[in-house]
Image (spheres, rainbow, N blue to C red):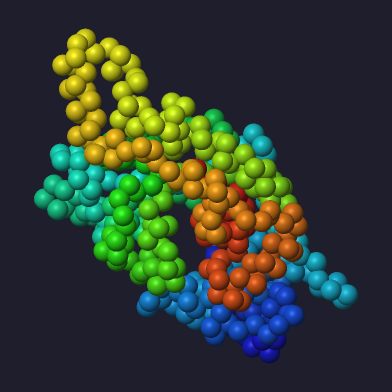
Amino acid sequence: MADQKFNTAPRSAEDTPNPSIQRPLFDEEPLDLETHGGLVVLETGQIAEVTPISFIPEGGDTGLDGPRVHLLPFDAVDTGEGQIITWRDAPYDPRTLTIGVETESMTMQASNAQWWDISPDGQTIRYPHGLATEPAARRGHQPELLKNTTESGSPIENLSRGHGQFIGNAEREKYGKQVWMIENGLVSVPLSIYPDSVHEDDITDHPYPQMLKRLMPRVLEYASCLSEQINIQWKSPEAAAFALNAYEMLGPVLGMITAASPARDGSLHTTLSQHYEHNPDFEAAGNAEDYRELAGLVRKELGPFMDRVPYDWRELARGYGSPAGGVIAQAAPLDVESFLREGDRQLRASEAMTVNRVLGPHANRWRPDKNVVEISN
């Protein structure tokens, strides 16, 4: 690789234009970028990751002069006796740290409580009224595995600064999404897992989900999971790894008291319907007829799974752990080089598409691309 030059697309205008790959970051074994991926050092000294060919969607750019190469905020400094990996320090203030949120939600028609395929192709949004459509990008929609799922989140250029601003922005964003859905004859269902079996024709036709379906034999199981992902700026990569390990120890406990908990109201036998009946509207029902009308409205809007026990078992499954989305199998290493070595190994073996998922495809994430820890709640 040392005598080969490849143009790599810069991630932003601040990056050096068209840097070229100089060498592998770790050179214990030959690097095969014709098929697999790996971590490389550019002529600028900056480290970049190369996506394995198998993770490029059909028809995507497989060259090394395009989006297959992603810059990372690290440099490899040659000391003459070896190399030292340094982090490109980012400004950090705990009072104004950057926080972002991504929300995934399933959609139903408000008129009949039937699932609605809001984006069969991942590129357009379609509505029940007259089958009207609009570009998905206009709504910030990202291609999701399920056709009836929409994702939205804080755009990178408009992240919140500090907890107070984040709470206000998140509330406005969620409220705006609810209004948008209601205005278009849809409702958003408060679930962390799709209650029905996922079939092949439920998967979005977009090339990216189709690529995942090809590579992951159990993708139909993973497709059923939904979450609200919080992105929190890290003080340093090492601090982020420490925080991830601490969170993993508390995750199963915290999950049992959140909105996604199967132990509603302290019991595994409380259905979602019964839970929603314990609120001021039901308590204020003047008579049995009013109560039945309210209960019927809840069932009409949110469907028959409201009476399942337990209504949502994702947190139970995460507590036991899985290779993809449960509690991480091994503690996160507390030094950058160990993290990157494992990421390089996975990229070289085409086991992962990015070092951002080195702890598991759907686990909580150490994300150097954004200088954040990403927590999936």
User: In the image, residue 142 lies at what x, y percent?
Assistant: 38, 56
Quadrant housing residue 147:
bottom left
Figure label count: 0
Classify 88 as above or below 291.
Answer: below
User: In the image, residue 183 lies at what x, y percent?
Assistant: 21, 38
Classify 279 as above or below 367.
Answer: above
Left or right of 130? Residue 68 is right
Classify 145 as above or below 261.
Answer: below
Classify 327 as above or below 24.
Answer: above
Name the residue furthest right.
Answer: 81
Quadrant housing residue 163:
top right
Look at the image and tell me whether residue 265 can be seen: yes
Left or right of 271? Residue 251 is right
Residue at x-position 46% and y-position 36%: 261
Name the residue furthest top.
Answer: 286
Residue at x-position 48% and y-position 43%: 315
User: In the image, residue 228 lies at what x, y percent?
Assistant: 45, 44
Compare residues 307 and 129 and report the one nearer the observer.
307
Residue at x-position 59% and y-position 76%: 349
Compare residues 162 and 243 and report the one nearer the observer.
243
Residue at x-position 30% and y-position 65%: 200
Look at the image and tell me whether residue 135 can be seen: no
Compare residues 303 and 374 and report the one nearer the observer.
303
User: In the image, residue 227 lies at what x, y percent?
Assistant: 44, 46
- Quadrant placement of the N terminus: bottom right
